[in-house]
Image: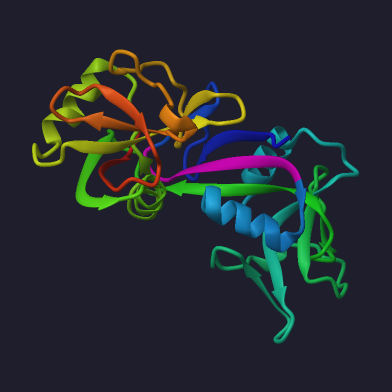
Amino acid sequence: SLVSQTKEISLTTFSFVGASVISQHVILQYHFVKEEKTWGKAQNYCRAHYQDLISIHSAQQMETIRSISGVNNEDAIWIGLRRNAGVKQWLWSNGDPVNTSMSDTNNNEKNCVAIKTNTKWQGEDCSKVNHFICMKENKTSGQREYHISSEERSWFEALEICRRDYTDLTSIHSPEQLQEIQSKIDLSAWLVWIGLQRNTDSNTWLWSSGDPVNFTNWYPEQPNNAHGSQHCAEILSNSSRWHDTSCTENRSFVCFSGKD
């Protein structure tokens, strides 16, 4: 089964509090995925679930990668560095500039790069299967802000828009946060997506942002998973209560940026 371990790190401040980092600039989340995939499939997975395969620009990042991977020195982990075979140029998957002094690819003809937990970089055949590390960059880390979209989309489309333009579909952790969101919702938007989705394997509810579920406000007798297909959560704006419904329904939605 898939195992993902997450750690947040600041690009400017490395003051750890638990599993997260206090920062006044950019927060970079690392997601170690303990599932073996080819480089291309790892890239697709990271882009679908987070942002991209990890790019590395400092020794501090290497330390973080080593601390969260928890694998043996013999194990290789995909990173986002790949050679454009046509022009023999190394490129990061997310478009970041390449600091060639960081890489040690043994001057071989392999076009994808993996690292070992002893920090050695090596060229690998891109069709080989390895564990990998995804990244997600939150461009703001100030106070949490909510962004209400009256444009109606499916839950998954809303998630994509929120992750593209802000941080994620909103998570809610207190009556005060719920009240603030409620005050911003246009009354014409009767049903509104939030970032809560059922994991159908474990039948548990999870926030799309990875935040812990420590507060809920379900309507009585909800969630009921009617017809076995109601796996996403919405707010009824006239009551602030939550219902589960089909993720393919079109709803307004609430994104957030920043942090608590």
Q: Nearer the viewer, residue 120 or 5?
A: 5
- Residue, x 71% and y 64% (percent of image)? 101
From which residue to which does the magenta span run? Answer: 24-35
Which quadrant of the figure contains the N terminus?
top right
Residue 30 lies within the magenta run = yes
Q: Give the left or right position of residue 146, taking residue 187 as reference.
A: right
Farthest residue toward the right? 74
- On the image, the x and y values in percent for residue 151 come to 21, 53
Residue 83: quadrant of the picture = bottom right
**In this image, 108 relative to 98: left or right?**
right
Q: Residue furthest front?
A: 227
Question: Please, which residue is most extreme toward the bottom here?
Answer: 86
Residue 88: x %, y % from top left: 73, 82
Report if residue 55 is visible in the image.
no
Relative vertical location of residue 82 with respect to residue 196 in this rendering, above or below: below
Number of numbered callouts drawn: 0
Residue 80 lies, in percent from the top left, at 66, 59
Rendered position, 57 above or below 228: below
Q: Residue at x 52, y 48 (%)?
A: 50
Up/down of 184 relative to 86, above or below = above
Looking at the rendered image, the quarter that the C terminus falls into is top left
* Picture residue at 47% right of the left edge, 23% below the top: 212
Please indicate whether residue 38 sits to the left or right of residue 164 in the image: right
Chief SS of the magenta region = strand
Q: Would residue 87 be counted in the magenta stretch? A: no
Question: Picture coordinates of residue 17 (x, y %)?
Answer: 50, 22
Using the rendered image of the protein, determine whether residue 174 is visible from the camera's viewpoint.
Answer: yes
Relative to 100, say whether 155 is above or below: above
The answer to which of 19 and 63 lies nearer the viewer is 19
